[in-house]
Amino acid sequence: MTKWKSLKRLTLLLAATTLAANAWADEVVVYHTWSKPSEIAALTVLREAWAKDGHQWKDLSIAHDSGANVSLMNMITGGNPPAIFMNSDPGIYRDLNKQGLGVPLTKLFDSIGATKNFPPSVLKNITVDGEIMKAPATVHIDGMVYYNKHVAEAAGVDPKSWKSLDDLFAAFDKVKAAGYIPIAQGGDQFQKAYLLQALIASEEGPDIYNRFYGEKPDRTVIDTPEMRAALKRFRQIADHTDPGSPNRQWNDTTNLVITGKALLQIHGDWMKGEFMAAQKKLGEDFDCINIPGTKAVVVTVDSWGFLNTNNADTAKAQEDFAKLDVDPKLNADFVLKKGASPVRTDADTTNLDACNKLVLETLKDPTKQVSNPFNMADADWYRTIWQEADKYWSDPKRTDDEFVQAMQDAYDQIF
Amino acid sequence: MTAISAASQAGRETKVRRRPLIRPNRVVIFLFLLMAAAFFAVPLYVIVVTSFKTMDQIREGQIFSLPSPWTTDAWSYAWMQACSGMNCNGVRIGFVNSLYILAPSLVLTISLSIITGYGLALWNVKWANGFLFVLFICAFVPFQIIMYPLIKITGALHIYGTTFGIAVIHSVLSMPFLTLIFRNYFKGMPPQIIAAAMIDSGSFWRIFFEIVLPMSGNIMIVVLILMITGIWNDFLVGLTFGAQDTQPMTVVLNNITVTTTGAKNYAVDMASALLTALPPLVIYFVLGRFFVQGITAGAIKG
């Protein structure tokens, strides 16, 4: 009798272990670089929806801005790669394609009607060598104006009435007179470079922008009146910021606007997360506009990529993941939590806030959008732009001639 | 301290009639020491007070002000709830992982390098000098250069992404340096003792366990401190060879604090950083004085 009992127990135990092993096998490793509460909330939306399709999310996060690519490649080399990863660098996808590890998504997105609803800048961003290789997760605008409404009232200015940058600078004198910093600007290289590219796009338009930041830039664009005009605007903003700007992080810079020390900041729309974290209300305490008189906005897209594992279950999981990610309803929920804008123009707008709607409205015009250089330009080229923008900003004596000369020299070396 | 200085002061007064209480060179020394202390203490002060503030107070931007009200929320949040990816279990996950990495690393590294060091120092090994030269060169090879082959090797051995794999890499990387340290220390032992032991027909292992090991307390402390702080503070090896569940505390800390487009909570960042730095600090406080002893013991004899 006892013998039978123990045998039964053993069988149960065996069954339990096999079941457990199966459960492990179904887990799919999802690799990303996010850890902040807003980001976790967004990922949770996706994970829960995906779980309903019967897939288990095994989380792997490494927050390392530049190292994320390296880590991914290390994991592939070590034979322990994630099936799903977050990455926007087209170089990574070219590498994967070369090794036969890429998973193209064109057919899938065509069949579910997503492709035709992506704004052109998004479509351009996720397409690598003619094939859609990335599933877009969020849309960010790199240069939006977020301002403190109380400061605007106190200084007697109304940002929504500005039609051009000249209006903005005219209002700045009033703001200064009222004792506020007109524009808060952070100190590290990327913030200045983002500001410059936002200015080139908004003031000089997509043509000049694409000739300067494109995959193969146009040498003649460097020395044009348009580029010099954009540089002049850049310098004008530098003259209006506060002495605390050098080395200041963007978060701390946003804080100046949140706490009412400065009127506005021109930076990526992820600023909204800081306002939300400080319990400020959109429309009451703060508000957002595009750069006045904007001709084009710079778009950054966070994307997911997939790694071919030659496993049917994993492939199914990846397909379900991609479908959910670009679902008009689910994507709207996702970006709302993250503090970004949806990747489709037909996204469900019921829960979106005024800033999201402004972005979607702007993105409906295909002529009004360009891509972040990160997602298309040569790395050496945009790094040089970053450095030169930084030098130009930090040294008031540096002339636009010197900027033009330096960029031309760099062009000759790189291309 | 006071008694001694008072006594010497009294002693001097009998010899020299007028001696000002505050001498200029003393003031200079004190000023310098004060500045040096402030140089290290001020950032620490800012980190500590920030970790006890609320986010509302941090936003005001007075980094030197004391917290009002004091709150330990950031500490408990950092330990229990801070998110590394979607795993919101705080830095304690990394703490445990770091311990799991540390234990086998220490055992492997020390046991291997103490024996090679002992062999090279006290026994006639063929090519010993050439071997030492190679080790010396190896100690200066940067990890980044050999990272790729190491990943390939660990991948082939199926230990890539495991805590044991990280421990093995730590051991391999610190072997040359530690072997040199042990070798130089053993070289300084009185040769008569070893010669006598050999005459008494002691074997390689017997001499090691009964004579050499009991005499290496000092150098053990030095190596322990070096290894514990080195392995605990390591980021790159843990990042490269760690996987989903094996990330050490530094990588978890990085996940919690680094953000590109997310909102920041400085109090939590500071508390997590302090929690991560705590174990090496404790080691230094507990073993610090032995450290100096060990270093000097090696220096005089070597």
Image (cartoon, coloured by chain):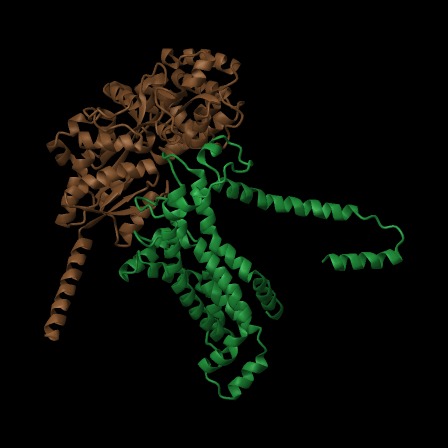
Across and down, in percent, residue A116 comes to: 16, 26
Q: Which of the 4 image quadrants contains residue B265?
A: top left
Q: How many marks?
A: 0
Q: Residue at x 38, y 38 (%)?
A: B259
Quarter of the picture holding the C terminus of chain B? bottom right
A228 left or right, relative to B181: left
Residue B107 in view in this figure: yes
Name the tint of chain A in the rendering. Answer: brown
Q: Residue at x 54, y 81 (%)?
A: B194
A347 left or right, relative to B166: left
Name the foreground residue: A386 vs A384.
Answer: A386
Q: Residue at x 53, y 40 (%)?
A: B46
Residue A169 in view in this figure: no
Across and down, in percent, residue B284 comes to: 53, 58
The chain whose colour is green is B
Q: Which of the 4 image quadrants contains residue B292?
A: bottom right
B77 left or right, relative to A6: right
